[in-house]
Every structure is written in C-alpha cells, then in structure tokens.
Image (cartoon, grey):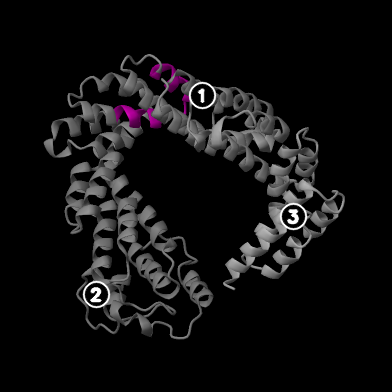
Amino acid sequence: MDYRTLLASGFAVGTVVGGVAAWLGIPPAQQTFTGDQRTQVAPGFAEDQAVEVIGEAASPEDSEPEDYYKSLEEARQTWLLAGSLTGLVELAQRWAAEAPEEAFDAFVRLFEGEDGFDESARRGLFMTIIRPWGRKDLDAALAGAGRVKELGIRSALITTALAGLADADAAAAFARIEASPEFQNPDFYGNVFSTWGREDPEAAQRSLAAIENPALRREAMLNMTSGWTQHDMMGALGWASTLTDARLRDEVLARIVSAAGGSWLDPEAGVQALEIMDNGPGRIQAAESFAESILPRWAKENPQGAMDWVSDYAAMCLENGSSASLTSKVVDAWVDLDPETALAWAATLPGESGEGVYRGAFSQWVEAAPAQAASYAGGLKVSRDRQTLYRTLTKGWVQHDPAALESWLSGISPGPERDAAVEGLIEFYAAENPEAAAAWTATLSEESSRKAWMENLRHDDGS
C-alpha cells in the first residue's frame, strides 16, 4: 500500500494525521480529518514539542527515493502545529528540481484546502517551484501560472517563469518576450536582462539595440547593469561611461553607485561613478545613498580610503550646494573617523543648516566619547563657541554618565560658560523631572536667567 492509499484511508504515521488526501484530490475511502479541523491536531502540544515530533517523522531511516506526498503532509503538519513554513519551502525546492509540474499541482491543491496561507506565503512557495519549471518547460510553467486566481501572484509567476528560462538561456528568453505582445512589460524585460547581465553582459549589450520601445530598452539597460555589477563592477562602469545620452548614463551610473554601496561592496567603483555623473538631483540622491550605506563598513575596512573620500567629497558638497542631508551624512561618517577635523570643517559651513550640521556632528561625538568631546569644546578659543557646545554636551552626557558629567561640571567656574552647560541639563530634565530641573536652575549665576527658567518651568508645570 503506498502512502497516498494510506492517507485516503485515514492512516496516521506517528503523530502525523493523514489529511492530505482531501486537498490533493485523491478519492478518499474514509476521511477523518480536514484542514478546517486544525485545532484538533495534537491538542496541548507546545511548539517545540510539535517541531520535535514532526522532525522525527520527517527523517526516515531508509534511503529510498523521497515520497513527496508524504513529505508534503509532514511539512504541512509542521506549519499547522508550529507555524513554520521552512519545511514547505525546502520541499518545494527539492520537488521542483525533480518534478516541477507535479509539485505545482500539489501546492495548488494544498492552498485550495487550507485558508491559513497568506498571499505572501503562497506567492513565495509558488515562485520557488515555477522558476526551475520555467527553466525546463516555459510553456508548461506559464500554463501552470494561469491556474492561479490572484492576478498579482499570477503576474509574479509569469515573470519568475521567464526568469527561469533566462537562467538556462537568456537569449531564448529575450526572443520569447520580443515575439510575444503580452510580454511587452518592463518587469519581464528587467528580469531577463538582470540575469543576462550577470551571465553574459556583452551579449546582453548587443541585444539592447533590438528593443524598439525606449521605455523597455531603458528598463533592460538598467537591470542589465545591476546584474553586471554582481561580478564585474569596473567593467559595468567602463561601459556606462561611454553612453552618450547624459540622462540615461546618469541613471545607469546611479545603479552602479547603489551596487557599490550595497551587498557588492566596491567603494572605488562608486567613487568613480559619482565623479562621472553630472551635477544635479540624481547625483545628490546617489551620493546620499552611497554615503549612508558604504561609509560605516568602508571606515572599518579601509579607514584612510574612507577618510580621503569623505574629505574630498565634503568639499564638493559645499562647492556644488549639495543638500544638507548629504552634507550631514558625510560629516557624521567623518566624525567616526576623525572628529576634530570633521568638526573644524563643519564649523565653516554657512547659514543655519551649517550650524545644524555642526551641532549634530558634535552630538554624535558626545554619544561616542563624551569626555573627549568635552575636552575639544573646552579648547575652543572663543567663549561663545564653548558655550554653544557645552549646552549640547551636557544634554547628551547626562543620559549616559551623570556622575562623570557632574565631576566635569564642578571644574568650571561660575559664569556664562557654566550657565550654558547647566541650561543643557535644565532642558533635559524639564519634561520628565521638573524638580531636578528646578534644582539646576537655582545654580545659574545670572539672576535674569534664573527667573526666566523658573517662569518657564512653572508654565510647563501648568501652575
């Protein structure tokens, strides 16, 4: 008797209930369990117990070929008992490699019989099966995708099936989408050319000219670049620099900058791509993303290289009027590398936005090394500059080491500088500890300041 016959008669394997017959469409001789009765499965089992039991049932000692229907029921039970999709995902991968059509059909029936799978889970499991299916037999895979009722999932499956064919033969996949009006879609072109760019960028380049629709050609070009950067960042950069359409070239270069700052870490390529790009919003946006994603890692792996770029690019930010957001990101990264030099440069930035960048950079230093930041602030030549930083210093330092802060504060003589430091403490305590704020207010040396702060605190207290 094979497993499907056992399931049809309600046979139980260990604690695994034989309910797979109903949702696989196998004519049952006797059904004792359905997907709607999941609350009756192993009542009282804790999740770890369920996983342990299912794990034992899913690990046969013999080495016979896998019975995928049995494995599907076991993985389904793991999902019912423990809420884990891992077993279903792994099964989908194995089954699709051997018999994708059978696997897809079984999962269609599974989803028809169980209402607990959300759209994301269904899409993910179907896509796991349909990509290798598309690699083997695109027409059959597309027909399978057509069985799925949800339009969003069906569209994703068609795209994934084409990507599967592209895995095996990108040129064939391209020929298919070019010859089929229903495939004249940016997603299809993007998916195929992403794979093609990764596998054979030269062939992909030659095929770009055959795409008549400018929007589809642009999508293919951008995705080809993304695929290309995964194994040859500098090759992609060299090709991009030859493009004559400045706008399209900058879009392609932005993809390279994004890749350089992402998982395919190559800071030198990102730096060069930014240098080639024309000044404008696209370049600023690309640089912001690059600075945010790459500088923390770059600073650890090559501090001098990161430092050189930061100092050069900071000057370029100022020269080209780049956004305050980008300037702030660059300075924040600079503070981690060389805080005194970063602050000295930030102090030269004009206007209120420059002051904001300067104070933000100092606050970051306070978070990391408050005593060093205090020493720097105390060494400034102009008293008003010291006052500005003392106020920021105490507001941040008190949150981490109030005892060390009070020790430092005790060494400052009464006067405007100490009052500025105390005002930082008053601002910090005003909302959550009015009594502490009032106590610090009483230590201000300037009577007018004491009265103004006391009035503010009474107003905040509602009295």
Left or right, 326 with respect to 417, comes to: left
Residue picked out by circle 2: 22
The residue lying toward the viewer, choosing from 317 and 406, is 406
Residue that mark 3 sits on: 422
**Is residue 353 depicted above or below 8 in this figure?**
above
Name which residue lies at 35% across and 49% down.
97
- Disc 3 residue type? Val
Q: Position of residue 383 (x, y in %)?
A: 76, 38
N-terminal label among 1 and 2: 2
Q: Is residue 202 magenta?
A: no
Amino acid type of the residue tagged 2 in the rendering: Ala
Residue tagged 1: 269
In this rendering, is residue 445 above or below 273?
Answer: below
Give x and y (percent) for residue 7: 30, 76
Q: Which quadrant of the rendered structure holds the N terminus?
A: bottom left
Q: Earlier in the sequence, mark 2 or mark 3?
A: 2
Above or below 241: residue 371 = below
Q: Position of residue 459 (x, y in %)?
A: 58, 67
Q: For mark 2, give the secondary structure.
A: helix
Of callouts 1 and 3, the N-terminal one: 1
Q: Quadrant of residue 95?
A: bottom left
* Disc 2 versus disc 3: nearer the observer: 3
Helix, strand or loop under label 1: helix
Residue range of the region highlighted in magenta in the rendering: 220-240
The answer to whether residue 50 of the structure is visible from this angle is yes
The residue under label 1 is which amino acid type?
Ala
208 left or right of 355?
left
Q: In the rendered image, is residue 294 in sight?
A: no
Residue 222 on the magenta span: yes
